[in-house]
Amino acid sequence: MRRASAVILLLYRRRDWQGKIAAVANGNVEREMLEIESINRLVLDIRAGRIRTFELTDPKAVEVNVTD
């Protein structure tokens, strides 16, 4: 997957997690916030070219190989 497409995939995934936070009624969003933080770091690493392969496991397992 090209670098730009990988970043877009992660941004959509981050938006999904943000939607889950909005839907949580009890206010316990620690796991969701950790996922968003992890995605934010991954986006920066991919944009900088420090990471070539990553795996997403929730909700569906996907392995992504980043190309230039």
Image (cartoon, rainbow, N blue to C red):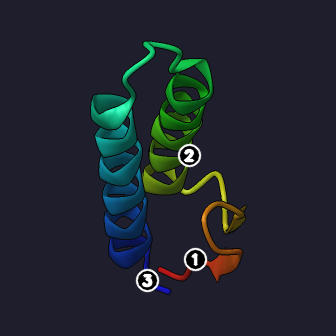
Type of residue at label 3?
Arg
x and y percent of residue 62 in the render? 67, 78
x and y percent of residue 49 in the render? 55, 57
Residue position marked by numbered label 2 in the rendering: 42
Which numbered disc, 2 or 1, marks the residue that appears first in the sequence?
Answer: 2
Element under label 3? loop
Element under label 1? loop
> Label 1 vs label 3: CA separation?
6 Å
Type of residue at label 2?
Leu
> In front: mark 2 or mark 1?
2
Q: Quadrant of residue 27?
A: top left
Q: Is there CB contact under 8 Å for labels 1 and 3?
A: yes
Q: Quadrant of residue 18?
A: top left
x and y percent of residue 16 in the render? 35, 53
> Which residue reaches farthest top?
27
Task: Note whether 3 is above or below 15 in the view shown.
Answer: below
Task: Note whether 39 is above or below 46 in the view shown.
Answer: above
Which residue lies at the image location 65% right of the left edge and 80% below the top edge?
65
Residue position marked by numbered label 3 in the rendering: 2
Label 2, residues with CA under 10 Å away: few <14, some 14-19, many ≥20: some
Residue position marked by numbered label 1 in the rendering: 66
> In front: mark 3 or mark 2?
2
Q: Is there CB contact under 8 Å for labels 2 and 1?
A: no
Which residue lies at the image location 41% right of the left edge and 44% below the top edge?
17
Numbered badge on residue 50:
none
Which numbered disc, 3 or 2, marks the residue that appears first in the sequence?
Answer: 3
Label 1, residues with CA under 10 Å away: few <14, some 14-19, many ≥20: some
Type of residue at label 1?
Val
Task: Note whether 25 is above or below 12 in the view shown.
Answer: above
> Which residue reaches farthest bottom?
1
